[in-house]
Structures are given as C-alpha cells and as structure tokens.
C-alpha cells in the first residue's frame, strides 16, 4: 500500500536572515521505498542547506517552531529552541538518508537565486532498521514529524546567544531557516 505525505515549508527567522525561505516536501512510501522530493525557494544563496525530519521518539505529535520558541529573546529560534515542540533531529535528507549520519557535507547547495531541489529514493528496509537501532521503533510515523531546512552564510553575524553546534559544525549550519508540518494525503 502506498502512503503519501506533504509539507508546506514556511519561513523561520526570516527577518534576521533577510530571505523568506519556503517550499514543499513530498514523501511517497511503499513497501520497499521512501521517495523524497523537496524544492526550496528564496533560501540564502550559494549555501549548503541541511534538511531533516524532526520528531519525538515516543510518538508524540511534533509541531513546527515559531518565534514563540525564542526563549532567550535574541530574535532568532535556534536549533535547541525547536526541541520542545519539534523533538530531535531524526532523518537527514542528504545523499544517504538511510545511514542517518546527520553531520556531513552531502546536503543540497542553493544556487545564486536561493533555489534548490532534492530528490531521493531511500531503501525503506535499511532506513527502518537504522531508525529502530537509534530510536527503538521502525515506524517512521511521518504524519507526526516536521521538516526543517537549516543554514545561513558564514558571513551572517549571529548573536552570541545563538547555539546549535553539531560535531564540527557551528550555528551557521544548523540555524533553522524554514519548517513545515508533514501531513498525510488521502
């Protein structure tokens, strides 16, 4: 049985960043495969954009972060501030989502106009096995997840209050620029 999901991706932190990143994500899941298609517009140009779905391992329904999550009132919602409503980073949309290796340089890079398109077929059995080893369940539960697109240029001066370092990557890489709630399509 094929299941389809979509997310309308809306801007986050746009006033500080100076662009209103937006787009759509489509997911088609059958017995063997998860097909992922994401297209983004008006992202910071010529920048690598990490993109993932986030959620709660216990199955709680994740929601997108808004400026209400800016708990330190620095004018930006950074990665740690998203966790209360969105959960943790789960599956990356890079060159090998089924490996769930989040910190890497294999994510899309936007063109000079801030556009990028990402499309990938992921072997569902491999993704579910890795998901189970990390989160204790092989149920992706896409309708309970949210998508985030991250990344601003190194030249953008971020306040010292912005955090979100992951491995050797700083908050420029992890700062959310757009988010969307994944929902099932009948």
Image (cartoon, rainbow, N blue to C red):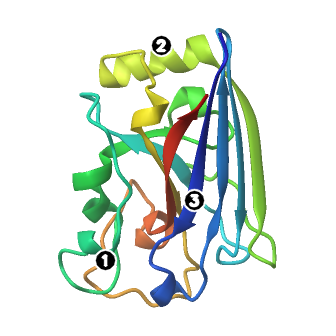
- Residue 131 placement: quadrant: top left
Instruction: Give the residue drawn at x 22%, y 54%.
Output: 84
Residue 1 picture location, percent across and down: 65, 9
Residue that mark 1 sits on: 162
- Residue 6 placement: quadrant: top right
Return the residue found at the far left.
72
Residue 119 picture location, percent across and down: 76, 41
Q: Which mark is residue 129?
A: 2
Horizontal side of 155 relative to 113 (left or right) equals left
Residue 171 picture location, percent across and down: 41, 70
Q: CA distance from mark 2 to mark 1?
A: 34 Å
Horizontal side of 68 relative to 142 (left or right) equals left
Label 1 secondary element = loop
Horizontal side of 59 relative to 42 (left or right) equals left
Mark nearer the viewer, 3 or 2: 3
Q: CA distance from mark 3 to mark 1?
A: 22 Å
Q: Earlier in the sequence, mark 3 or mark 1?
A: 3
Q: Relative to 112, say whether 119 is above or below.
A: above
Instruction: Give the residue drawn at x 51%, y 39%.
Output: 183
Mark nearer the viewer, 3 or 1: 3
Quadrant position of the C terminus in the picture: top right
Depth check: give the residue in front, 170 or 132: 132
Instruction: Give the residue drawn at x 26%, y 34%.
Output: 60
Packing grade of label 3 (10 A; few <14, some 14-19, many >=20) is many
Q: Relative to 114, say whether 18 is above or below.
A: below
Packing grade of label 2 (10 A; few <14, some 14-19, many >=20) is some
Residue that mark 3 sits on: 9
């Amino acid at each position: 049985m094929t299941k389809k999901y979509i997310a309308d991706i809306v801007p986050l932190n746009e006033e500080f960043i100076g662009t209103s990143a937006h787009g759509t994500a489509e997911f088609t899941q059958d017995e063997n495969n998860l097909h992922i298609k994401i297209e983004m517009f008006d992202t910071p140009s010529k920048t690598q954009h990490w993109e993932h779905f986030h959620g709660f391992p216990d199955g709680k329904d994740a929601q997108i972060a808004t400026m209400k999550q800016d708990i330190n009132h620095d004018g930006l919602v950074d990665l740690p501030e998203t966790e209360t409503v969105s959960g943790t980073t789960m599956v990356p949309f890079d060159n090998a989502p089924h490996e769930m290796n989040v910190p890497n340089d294999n994510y899309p890079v936007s063109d000079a106009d801030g556009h990028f398109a990402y499309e990938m077929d992921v072997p569902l059995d491999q993704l579910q096995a890795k998901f189970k080893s990390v989160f204790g369940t092989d149920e992706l539960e896409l309708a309970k997840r949210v998508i985030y697109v991250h990344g601003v240029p190194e030249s953008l001066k971020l306040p010292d209050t912005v955090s979100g370092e992951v491995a050797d990557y700083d908050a420029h890489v992890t700062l959310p620029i757009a988010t969307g709630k994944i929902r099932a399509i009948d």
